[in-house]
Image: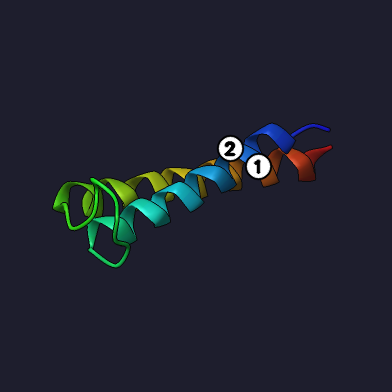
Amino acid sequence: MRGWLTLTLGLLAVVIGAVWTVQGLGYVDGSAMTDERTWAVIGPIVALVGLAVLWLGLRSRRRH
């Protein structure tokens, strides 16, 4: 079970970051975040952090 939490959190961060990015760029309507440049910047940062967490989770699973 080692690494599952980090893998799950990393994947969740990547998905949330991607959604925030497309909302910030104006591709998804119906949200207060739609077409707000702030979310177009925060989204990719969250997605990159998620990728780093995924990488750490994969490394910890391979060691054991």
Q: Nearer the viewer, residue 31 or 15?
A: 31
Figure label count: 2
Q: Going 42% across and 50% down the picture, which residue do you hit?
A: 47
The quadrant of the image that shows the C terminus is top right
Give the Cα distance between marks 2 and 1.
6 Å
Label 2 is placed on what type of residue? Leu
Q: Position of residue 16 (x, y in %)?
A: 45, 47
Other residues around mark 1 within 10 Å, as few (<14) / some (14–19) / many (≥20): many
Q: Residue 7 bears which disc, if any?
A: 1
Q: Going 23% across and 64% down the picture, which residue do you hit?
A: 26
Q: Nearer the viewer, residue 5 or 53?
A: 5
Asked whether, in this view, residue 10 is left or right of residue 18, the answer is right
- Secondary structure state at the residue bearing disc 1: helix
Q: Going 16% across and 52% down the picture, which residue do you hit?
A: 36
Residue under pointer 2:
9
Q: Residue 51 bears which disc, if any?
A: none
Residue at the outermost front position: 30
Residue at the outermost bottom position: 27
Q: Going 33% across and 47% down the picture, which residue do you hit?
A: 45
